[in-house]
Image (spheres, rainbow, N blue to C red):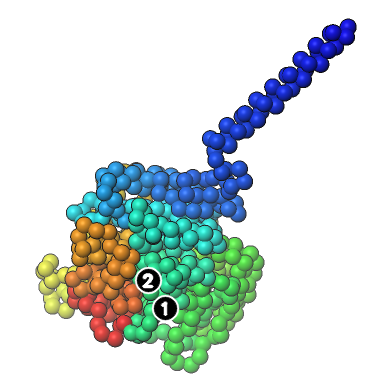
Amino acid sequence: MLNWLYNTFWATLIRKVCTVLVVLAVVVSLAVIIPGRIGAPEYCAEGVERSAGECIGVSASGYDFGTDGIREVTRAIGEENKRISEQEREGNLVTVAMMLPLQPKADAERKQLRSELQGAYLAQWRANRTENKPLLRLVLANPGADYAQQEKVVDRLAAMADSPRDNLRAVTGFNLSLDNTKRAIDRLTNKLHIPVLASRVSADEIANTDNGGALKYAGLARIIPTNRQQAAALANFHGGLRDADTVLVKDLRPNDIYDESLAKAFSRPEPGPPGPKDQPFTSPGINDPGDTGNDFTFIGHNICESDAKVVYFAGRPVHLRLFALKLSEVPCHGKKYTVVSGSGAATLDRYMSAADWEKLRGDDGGGSTITVQYAAPGHPDAWDASLRTWEKEQRARTGKSPAVRDRPVYLTEPQDELRELRRLIDREAAGDIGPVSLEDSRTMLVHDGVRTIAAAVFLANSQAAGTVPTRTRVAAQWPRLEARYRVRGTSGWICLTNGGNAYDKPVAVVQLDPATRRVAFVGLGWPEKKPQPADCVVPSGTG
């Protein structure tokens, strides 16, 4: 009996010791296979880690950040990056980073994001099939919602700018005018000396002045008119409005410099006796209506009692939609309004439901009382429609049809560019990138932005062929992009001032069309009251 107990004790002990040794061996093996992962941030993809519930970082591989609807275009970007990396073994590549929130929650925002990525990719695809060098590698940089984690991403971009393997030479994207966006651009340009091309942010606070003085953001270029320029273009387009005809409704939510800048731009002096005072409201967030519907009902009743027939709206699309609907519900003796806003409303139609369209159309029997109009950075019908208008005016003036050679090139060149973009999309030469919509202008404008970066890189490289140009050299080309070196964009000529601003860039005045449930082109508005000068030579006094 004692022998049996003795043998059982030692057998059990040996089994336990063996089990412990096996477990330790597995742990040690995992530690060797996955070094440094214990206690490290959660891995999302190469160069991207989870932080505060989001995948933050920079990716060149085609990673879609888990966002529905963008997988096709991110895959295409990854494949193009792989193709050119294999082709250019000597490293004759430069990297361009698209920095914008890549995990939006709302369906409308995801569609906006897809449009922007499609525009960037199509421009990359075109640039890499010219005879110009170096080739462009496109990476996606996610700073998180509202750019809240931009510091981590800027750190990574700084390392890429100094790396001879990455050769980061420009950062673009920037689709929200916020304090965080401003801080990111300030550090990129002034501290790290990395060129920045802003294609979507329109706040005047994120722009250099054209007074010939020191640049607020050294190395910044922008191809979208500022809010001040948009307001001037809208005023010039409408013409003759008295102060009593207009009223300003503005969002006072802090840290949103788009709303603040647009409100300031719409406050430009107008002739005649004073109109109604500004009507403020405070929203809880960019995409959160909160209780603003109640505010808009009260504001609508007050506007009804005034002479105002044009309402300037300084706010985001979610709130603009709600305001227009609430204003349409206010019984005001058959009074009709035009609600006017800035380029931030470029995707307003994507927030509209079938019931919303019916209400704007007046399907309740009361008739349509609201026209929603805004300054879009571009529209696919702009050039064809504007040329028809020009030809009609010429026939009325001369009594005969103008010759094709006499058509203004500031209309025909963008028309040609847009046709080329459409051909590229229609024949799918660039691969499957998902459904493409040009009406929201985002694909067009971001495409033009990356094309502008490519023009600066190629121009810098032409002066020292066979080398990758320095960041300083690329930034130095922004003021050269005018006249002979103007960029022929799908959204119009891009002719940069010495401050890096697009001179007299036209805006497409558009409006929601309830009959078709689409965005209709109305006409072109020019910040300087007249079209850009011949061959886009920027005049003196503009930087």
* Residue 306 percent location from the top left of the image: 55, 83
Determine the secondary structure under disc 1: loop
Q: Amino acid at mark 2?
A: Leu
Please tell me whether residue 124 is drawn above or below residue 284 in the rendered image: above
Q: Relative to residue 10, is residue 253 depicted above or below? A: below
Q: Which residue is mark 2?
A: 220
Q: Quadrant of the N terminus?
A: top right
Between 236 and 66, which is closer to the camera in this rendering? 66
Left or right: 297 in relation to 481: right
Viewed as shown, does residue 441 lie left or right of 409? right
Label 2 close to label 1 by CB (< 8 Å): yes
User: Circle 2 — which element?
Assistant: strand
Query: Which of the two residues, 366 or 163, is positioned nearer the viewer here?
Result: 163
Provide residue 202's location: percent of width, then percent of height.
42, 71
Query: Depth check: 473 or 394 in front?
Result: 473
Asked whether residue 268 appears in the rendered view, the answer is yes
CA neighbours of label 2 inside 10 A, class few (<14), some (14 to 19), many (20+)? many
**Residue 22 figure quarter:** top right
Q: Marks 2 and 1, Cα distance to the nearest angstrom?
A: 9 Å
Residue 346 location, quadrant: bottom left
Residue corresponding to mark 1:
216
